[in-house]
Image: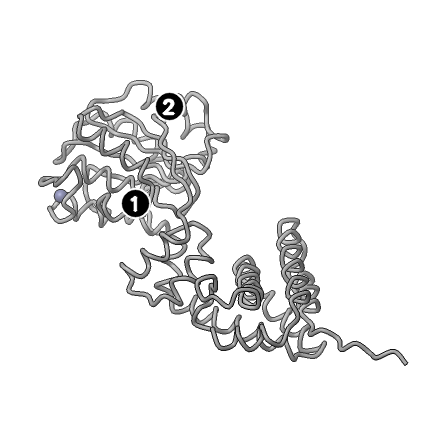
């Protein structure tokens, strides 16, 4: 995708476009920032701009042969290297590799040759900060020490801390940041034709990661999971002890979903509280559940909702401390119990 399709990251984009326009392209870049914010898309956009046959307004056209092949991971001069797996056939699918880790070392020989058909050879190293193999890091360093002409190395990392300082110091640093929820929401509506209700919820649960948002927006499985989870939270209002335990056991089976489940529960009770206090849709995340939110907000005291929010925050902390998922959820679901009616003292 060309730069114009990236959401936010204007600082990084400006830096790269300026380099391309002025012809002062560095031999090596280090894209640092959280996962899912567009680091890889920016690397492809840069590779496109450097090799595009018909650049327009200092951006790739997105349609010429190099542009199309780069997007599809099929351009001979733009290669993605996954440091743990070797060269990737399709850069978006890390399960499909054509060459193993040994061949990463062979890269050193490959980079010395001029581009096959493009203007620049671009090597993108995904997860460069997980390059634990000393050998791989050292081969990379060798390339960076004697950079061949017309070769651009792009290292993608979440942090520079685990990387060899000698590698970091040879790269131009390009920082990427989390994307604001409002921008993700707008992008989902404009590009993925989502309605406001779903876009608001997905932008919230994406936590600043556009990549995560797009996955949510395009996955039927994720949407069904959200439906089931919201129904579960509604059921908690009338569930007895046994039902709570059963629900906890069931939900704990999908450990990978646990962070999302806690986020979703957090947004849900926040929505109830926010609705109680403001009655303004603009603050509601689960906009498509307005009626249920209004009904429950009228039935549950604000203090109870606040306690539940605290309970979820504590569960998140438990998750970080590796508390067993089932215990964590049992504890949490018990704390979602409806308020006990006060027994009038006689
Ligand atoms: Zn093009």
Q: Earlier in the sequence, mark 2 or mark 1?
A: 1
Between 10 and 93, the residue placed more toward the observer is 10
In this rendering, would 147 be left or right of 52?
right
Q: What is the x, y in percent for residue 164?
A: 46, 25
Q: What is the x, y in percent for residue 261?
A: 55, 63
Residue 140 sits above or below residue 6 on the image: above
User: How has the structure been colored for display?
Assistant: one colour
Q: Residue at x 19, y 43 (%)?
A: 75
Asked where in the image residue 58 lies, by quadrant, the reply is top left
What residue is disc 1 on?
A: 41
In this rendering, would 278 be left or right of 327?
left
Q: What is the x, y in percent for residue 248?
A: 64, 69
Q: Residues within 10 Å of mark 1 (few under 14, many from 20)?
A: some
Asked where in the image residue 193 lies, by quadrant, the reply is bottom left
Quadrant of the rendering where the C terminus is positioned: bottom right
Asked where in the image residue 115 lies, by quadrant, the reply is top left
Query: Under tag 1, what secondary structure?
Result: helix
Residue 311 sits above or below residue 16 on the image: below
Q: Residue at x 24, y 47 (%)?
A: 73
- The numbered disc on residue 141 is 2
Q: How far is disc 2 from disc 1 in space, using C-alphas?
A: 24 Å
- The numbered disc on residue 154 is none
Q: How many marks?
A: 2
Q: Quadrant of ligand 1?
A: top left
Q: Residue furthest right?
A: 346
Query: Under tag 2, what secondary structure?
Result: helix
Q: What is the x, y in percent for residue 154?
A: 31, 33
């Amino acid at each position: 995708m060309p730069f114009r399709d990236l959401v936010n990251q204007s600082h990084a984009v400006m830096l790269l476009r300026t380099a391309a326009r002025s012809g002062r392209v560095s031999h090596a870049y280090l894209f640092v920032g959280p996962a899912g914010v567009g680091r890889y898309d920016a690397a492809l956009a840069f590779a496109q701009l450097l090799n595009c046959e018909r650049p327009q307004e200092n951006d790739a056209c997105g349609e010429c042969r190099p542009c199309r092949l780069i997007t599809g991971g099929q351009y001979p001069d733009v290669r993605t290297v996954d440091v743990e797996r070797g060269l990737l056939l399709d850069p978006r699918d890390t399960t499909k590799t054509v060459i193993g880790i040994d061949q990463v070392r062979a890269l050193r020989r490959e980079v010395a040759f001029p581009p096959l058909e493009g203007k620049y050879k671009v090597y993108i190293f995904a997860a460069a900060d997980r390059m634990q193999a000393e050998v791989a890091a050292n081969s990379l360093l060798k390339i960076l020490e004697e950079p061949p002409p017309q070769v651009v190395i792009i290292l993608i990392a979440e942090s520079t801390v685990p990387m060899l300082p000698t590698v970091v110091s040879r790269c131009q640093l390009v920082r990427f940041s989390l994307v604001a929820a409002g921008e993700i929401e707008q992008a989902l509506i404009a590009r993925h034709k989502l309605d406001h209700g779903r876009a608001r919820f997905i932008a919230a649960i994406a936590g600043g990661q556009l990549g995560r948002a797009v996955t949510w927006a395009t996955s039927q499985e994720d949407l069904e999971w959200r439906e089931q989870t919201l129904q579960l939270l509604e059921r908690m209002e009338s569930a007895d002890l046994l039902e709570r335990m059963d629900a906890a056991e069931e939900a704990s089976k999908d450990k990978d979903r646990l962070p999302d489940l806690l986020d979703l529960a957090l947004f849900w009770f926040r929505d109830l509280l926010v609705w109680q206090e403001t009655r303004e849709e603009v603050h509601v995340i689960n906009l498509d559940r307005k009626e249920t939110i209004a009904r429950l907000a009228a039935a549950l005291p604000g203090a109870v909702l606040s306690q539940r929010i605290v309970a979820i925050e504590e569960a998140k902390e438990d998750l970080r401390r590796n508390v067993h998922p089932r215990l964590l959820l049992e504890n949490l679901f018990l704390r979602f119990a409806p308020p006990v009616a006060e027994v009038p003292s006689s």
